[in-house]
Amino acid sequence: MNHIAHCFLSFDDPEVLLGNFIGDFIKGRQWAGYPSGIQKGILLHRNIDAFTDAHWGSLEGVRQLRPIAGRYASPILDILYDHLLYRNWAVYSTDIFDVFAQTVFVNLDAQHTNMPEPLFSRWPRMLEGRFLYAYTTPEALDSVLRGFIARYSIPADADALSAYFWDHIDVFEKNFNLFFPEMVLAVQQKGLTG
């Protein structure tokens, strides 16, 4: 899962939101140095990633992308899943997406001094660019995919990857809509916070 999903799965708790948002930047037991609410969010982030990586729907998506994306198929699927969450937003949330996004921006900005480097340095640009919206349109999503491939020097053709996703979006969306309710349920009822 990527930014939209991790923020959504924090369920309006500002400290959990921050922990979930910074989760990729906290290694090993560094989480223990944060306040308890942020710790909960970091552990939630890790458990969301583990649940996603083990779910059959995600494994099928990775299998589909692997011929184009190689070993980066999993993080690329995470990016695509954020678009699919936005595309199906009304199924999973009663909030208007713009209200959700603005709440996320305000809550993260209020706590941004707790962000680790290099996220702390990037935060002003991310906030100014309203980063959650980077997953909402086909053009913006294609730009995210190109940027991700370039940043990590992935030997993949961004145009071919994008074309494959849009050509098979019905299959990806079907798998997402089987997977994501299970994720929400696991976070809400099974306590994936550690």
Image (tube, helix red, strand yellow):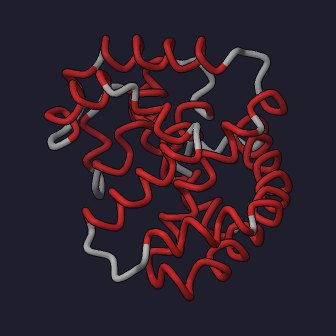
Horizontal and vertical percent position of residue 183? 73, 48
Identify whether 179 is placed above or below 136.
Answer: below
Task: Report the front residue among 187 and 66.
Answer: 66
Identify whether 105 is placed above or below 178.
Answer: above
Q: Say left or right for 48 vs 41.
A: right
Q: Say left or right for 151 vs 5.
A: left
Horizontal and vertical percent position of residue 179? 79, 56
Q: Going by the picture, which residue comes out furthest to the bottom?
A: 67
Q: Residue at x 74, y 31 (%)?
A: 89
Horizontal and vertical percent position of residue 58? 69, 67
Q: Residue at x 47, y 27 (%)?
A: 17
Q: Residue at x 39, y 25 (%)?
A: 130
Task: Report the front residue among 19 and 58.
Answer: 58
Q: Residue at x 27, y 68 (%)?
A: 152
Q: Say left or right for 58 vs 139.
A: right
Identify whether 106 is placed above or below 168.
Answer: above
Q: Quadrant of residue 15?
A: top left
Q: Quadrant of residue 167?
A: bottom right
Horizontal and vertical percent position of residue 148? 35, 60
- How many marks the image carries: the answer is 0
